[in-house]
Amino acid sequence: MFLPGTLYYSPLTYEWPGSRGSMTAPETQGLNTAPMDIETDIERIKSLAEAKEEENWHFRAYLKGLDLSEAALDRVVWRHLEDMTRRIDCCACANCCTVVSPLLSHKDVRRLAGHVGIGETQLIGEYFRLSKERDSYVFEHSPCRFLRDGRCSVYEARPDDCRWFPHLHKREFRSRLIGVVENCSICPIVYHVFEGLKMELWRGRRRGR
């Protein structure tokens, strides 16, 4: 989801967990990256995800009980993530900016205020409200008011929650599966990564029984 020069960060220069400096995701060598048709139309992605919702929850249960270490599963996810981020351009989507409500820390607010050139109190009053937990902020309006012409107008200072969406690069993928299933209808990258995991970890093994 993150190609150089697009709306989001690039995995090609992202410091993957356990790495030093810029590198591609672990265990991507040998991955078939030949061109193929990838569905990116967000309305079609929503329909596909809705049709597969029950299957996705079944696959979540399968992954929870899969005899594969956390580290090994994370490496499989990163491999599929690297493949999809090479094929899908976020600039053609930005759906997360219209439907996802990120949590902002005080650090995020301070960074945004400095970037926009107004005080933190004024920024909070115009754009944010306290979260239910009252320890962070959320945007007052949706879509994000910083989204202009399909692009983030505060990209360099964007909140960390936006910076790392859809969070597939993080460790312990298995602990976040509820969010992953929910994001299948929001993010084409998540949808295709989850489908790739099904093909590799689930359907092949089921056919082999």
Image (cartoon, helix red, strand yellow):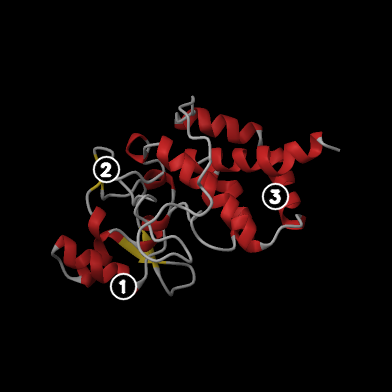
Q: Position of residue 106 (x, y in %)?
A: 33, 73
Which residue was labeled with disc 2?
Answer: 151
Q: Are marks 1 and 3 in contact (CB under 8 Å)?
A: no
Residue 92: give its label: none
Q: Secondary structure at mark 1?
A: helix
Mark 1 and mark 2: span between their CA atoms?
A: 22 Å
Q: Quick check: can you spot residue 167?
A: yes
Residue 107: give its label: 1
- The residue furthest right is 209
Q: Secondary structure at mark 2?
A: strand
Who's the residue at 26% across and 50% down the image? Answer: 146
Q: Amino acid at mark 3?
A: Arg
Q: Mark 1 or 2 closer to N-term?
A: 1
Q: Position of residue 23 (x, y in %)?
A: 39, 55
On the rendered image, what quadrant is the C terminus found in?
top right
Crowdedness near tag 3: few (<14), some (14–19) or many (≥20) residues, C-alpha within 10 Å: many
Mark 2 and mark 3: span between their CA atoms?
A: 33 Å
Q: Position of residue 178 (x, y in %)?
A: 62, 54
Q: Mark 1 or 3 closer to N-term?
A: 3
Q: Amino acid at mark 1?
A: Lys
Q: Position of residue 86 (x, y in %)?
A: 41, 39
The foreground one among 156 and 77 is 77
Who's the residue at 53% across and 34% down the image? Answer: 46
Instruction: Answer above or below: position of 194 versus 175.
Output: above
Q: Relative to residue 145, is residue 115 drawn left or right?
A: left
Who's the residue at 45% across and 31% down the image? Answer: 40
Q: Relative to residue 174, is residue 85 drawn left or right?
A: left
Q: Are marks 1 and 2 in contact (CB under 8 Å)?
A: no
Between disc 2 and disc 3, the foreground one is 3
Crowdedness near tag 1: few (<14), some (14–19) or many (≥20) residues, C-alpha within 10 Å: few
Which residue was labeled with disc 3?
Answer: 60
Between disc 1 and disc 3, the foreground one is 3
